[in-house]
Amino acid sequence: MLVERHASWVALNNVVGCPNNCIYCFLNEKKSCAPLQVTDAKSAVETLLKSEYYNKDDAICIMPNTDIFATPSNIKQFFLVCSELKKRNIKNLITIITKREINVKNAQIIAAFRQYLNICVYVSYSGLEPDFEKGIRKNNEVEAITSMKNLKSYNIPCIHYWRPLLPQNSDEKTLQQVFDIVKRYCIASCMTGLKLYKNMSCQSYWPEAQKAFDSGINPECFVPKGSFDKIVNLATKNNYHVYVDNVCLMAEIMNKPCSYGIYKTYRCEKYNICSKKQRQICGEFYGFKKPQNIEITEEKSLNDIINIAKIQKAHISGNNKNSTYWQSSFTNKEWLEL
C-alpha cells in the first residue's frame, strides 16, 4: 500500500524494492531488485495527508520499503517528497532509514530542509560481515559509518538501528566495536533481533531460530541470548540511550510521553534506557502508575490497537495477526532469546 500504519509511524511507500542484498531482509520479493516508483511525489503526499492513518502527532516514515539512499533515483524522490511536505508546512517528525552512504552534498541538502522540516535519520549498522550484507561498502568502509559521520557534521539527528542481532554479531567484541562507533555519532540506538515471516528462511545462518519458527513459535523477534543485556550494560556505563521499543525512542525525540502503554513494564524499566526527563514526562502522563492492561481477543487493525492504547492510556496484550514488522510488541509475545 502507498500509505501504511506501522507501530512506530505512518509509512509512505512511494518507492518499493531494494537493490541491497541482505540475506535477512524482511522485504522478501521486494529485495535485491531495482526500486520501483509507485507514484510521483506530489500525489504521494496528497494521498498521505488524506489517509485515515495520517494525524498531526505521529511521525511519518518516507520510503521504508526500499533503502532511501541506495540509488540516485531514490534520493531524488526523497527530496521531491520533502519539497512537497515543505510546501504544506508539515510539522510531523519525518524519519528515513538507510544503511547506504549519505554523502556530504546530500547531508547538506537534508540540513537545508531541516530549516522547515523536522527530519531525523535512522542509520542501520549491524557489524555483520560482508556475506550478510552485500553492496553496502565503499572504499573498504561500511557506508553507514560514513553516513553517521556526515550527519553528525551537519547536526542532523542520527539514530542507530542496531539490527538484526544474530549469533554472528552478538559476541562481546563485535558489540563493543559497534558501540564504540555509534556512541560518537548517534543520539540513541534501537536494538532488535530477527523477525521471521513465512517466505523467509534463516536456516543457513541461524538454524535454531528457523526450527523454532517452523514449529509455530512466532515472537516479536528472535534474539541471541544475552545480547540485549550486553548492549544495555554498555549503554548504562556510557550514559548512552538504547531502546527495544522504537515508539519510546521517538517519544523522547519529540519531547512527549510515549502513549503506547509501555510505561513501567519490564521493557520500560530494563531495556528502554531513556533520560530522567523522559521518565518524568511519561510518569506524569500515566499518573506514575503502571497502565491498565487491555487484552485484545478479536481481530482489529493495527491502527485500532494503537488508538485503544493511546485513548485509554492502556497496555495492550493478546495475539493478533495484524501486527507489523517495526517492533510488533503489541500483539506478538515479546522476543525469544536463543
Image: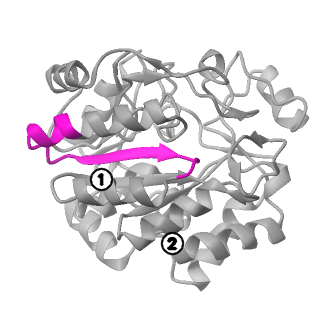
Please determine whether, in this image, residue 109 is positioned above or below residue 233: above
Check disc 2 and report the residue beneath it: 185
Please determine whether, in this image, residue 247 is positioned above or below residue 42: below
Q: Do the residues labelled 1 and 2 touch (CB within 8 Å)?
A: no
* Residue at the spot 84% in from the left edge and 42% down from the top edge: 131
* Residue at the spot 51% in from the left edge and 76% down from the top edge: 240
Amino acid type, callout 2: Tyr
Tell me where residue 92 appears, x and y as whole percent.
20, 46
Residue 86 part of the magenta-drawn span: yes
**Relative to residue 133, is residue 283 drawn left or right?**
left
Residue 190 part of the magenta-drawn span: no
Q: Distance between the residues labelled 1 and 2?
A: 16 Å
Tell me where residue 134 appears, x and y as whole percent.
76, 40
Check disc 1 and report the residue beneath it: 119
| Region rendered in magenta | 83-101
Between 172 and 45, the one lying in front of the other is 45
